[in-house]
Image (spheres, coloured by chain):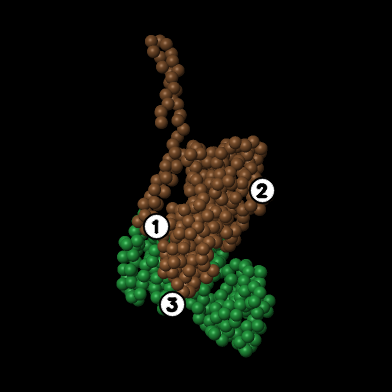
Chain colours: A green, B brown
Amino acid sequence: MSDIKVVPAGDQAVVLEFENRIDPDINAMVRAADYYLNQEGIMEGLFETVPTYRSLLIYYDPEIWDLDKLKESLLGIEEHLQEATIPNPETLEIPVAYGGEYGPDLDHVARHNNLSPEEVITIHHSSTYLIYMLGFVPGFPYLGGMSEAIATPRLENPRTQIPAGSVGIAGNQTGIYPLDSPGGWQLIGRTPLKLFDPAKEDPFLPKPGHNLKFYPISEKEFKAYL
Amino acid sequence: MPAVNIIDAGPFTTVQDEGRYGFQRYGMAPAGAMDEVAYRLGNLILGNNQGEASLEFTLKGPRIKLLQDTTLVITGGRCAITVNGTSGYNIYEPLSLKSGDEVDIGWITEGARGYLAFRGGLDIPMVMQSYSTYLRGKIGGFEGARLKGGEILAISEPQGSPGRALPENLWPAYRTPFETDVIMGPQANYFTEEGINTFLSETYQISDAADRMGYRLTGPEIIHVDKADIISDGIPLGAIQVPGHRQPIILMKDRQTTGGYPKIATVASYEIFRLGQAKPGDQLLFKKVSLKEAKAKRELHKKWYDELASFILKPEQKSKHFRLTVNDKSYNVSIREID
């Protein structure tokens, strides 16, 4: 954990950078730093943090911090991270109705990988995925850990409208569309859960640095959620 | 209690406030007024609490009909204002109007965005602690969308009393070319020395692809050392990213919160409001500043704003009237403080 850097990003933000790779262990350090810094009373004058794959963007109050002081404090958190109690990541469970009208590309993904649709479903929901970060649109999780056995290139012609909750594959990534939006992912199923619901007190289901698991449900169970 | 009818929304009008903070970690852009200074001055002039919801219009203002008596103000880009077909009304001037009055806000002749604020603020639901419309997330403002015309918006009860109008010599100016201070980085090391020199010495033009998310610029190519990809990280306000096509993009209030292109520089915080007044065709020049210089300029910016605010809040020169009796003779006397 020697390779941490503080890089200015304008006059009111810095990036706390860890090693330059996509790796669950490095992402765990990002989550630890994020958790630590957002605890009450640790560092005043920090506005907002944005954890990503291997770095943490930190918006700060420039009335309170200058870069040198901030750098010193941030580089000093390394030692605190070892003594601090960082809660274990939680696992978010996402029910998915695979195939049929909810997953119009399931058969294509199966054919592309010389598998049966059932095998694709089993492989897809057997992995535990790491939510490396959220971005792109509100509530969209960047997931790591999909099996190469079901990797499939994007559609050549993206769809103009994909319903919220659609679960798809693009290359060696899987993801969930939190909002109705256009897109080119191969759709293999849909979840009845709302990943983003602004009316809720806690509007976002996925949390950066936590885990996610899919489990299959029937069309009937899907409809019972609505 | 209906209050204002939007007859014609204009080309692009949304409800905005100071923005929605604390959710970038979940992929949610802060949104908020592109020109925070003009937005804040609107509320200040009307005696509103800061943070009340206003309309942000782009290039041209809306045409509205009042359904109740109210005071309103238009701030930001310079534009012609007519009330019931009569011209001669000014921006930064509180206008006390009657139910039935029609206000038409014309094309902006300097700047790109204006703010229409009502005394009391627009009465709309708050979503995740903000009134701001975030179009991509389809939330906030009026049903998460831009105004299309035909809407009827309610206005909240007035809070304070209107302050003074700003005279024309105090209106914020938005002259082109926009000379914009930047702090280099966070990924300036992804560019060649020549690429950085190009960026800092050439003129860039805002293309037609310019909206609340960001502005795509066109100009001389900015050369990368090698790759034009990074492992996606957070995008601060005002970040200038340069993808493989070598043309810069400035990320503004509705920006995506994360991205995978290297960011050559970041616009200084005190320049954002003025950049919020840029439009397609405007020219930009970038000037590198140190964090120390940025601090000094940020303080000057704050001082300038505070002076405008104290002008607005300073009470009108009210006269005090006395009746004096001297040697049994009565005099009416008025006393007024001299500036």
- Cα separation between marks 2 and 3: 51 Å
Instruction: Place residue A165 in its image quadrant.
Output: bottom right
Q: Which residue is mark 3?
A: A21
- Residue B289 percent across, percent down from the top left: 39, 57
Name the chain letter of the residue that bears numbered label 1. Answer: B
Q: Which residue is mark 1?
A: B289
Please report contact status of discs 2 and 3: CB closer than 8 Å, yes or no.
no
Secondary-structure class at tag 2: strand
Residue toward you, B68 or A74: A74
Q: Which residue is mark 2?
A: B8
Residue name at image x 65 percent, y 79 percent:
A105
Quick check: B133 left or right of A70?
Answer: right
Residue name at image x 64 percent, y 42 percent:
B104
Whether residue A108 is visible: yes
Residue name at image x 39 percent, y 48 percent:
B300
Instruction: Place residue A5 in its image quadrant.
Output: bottom left
Labels 1 and 2: the sequence-earlier one? 2
Secondary-structure class at tag 1: loop
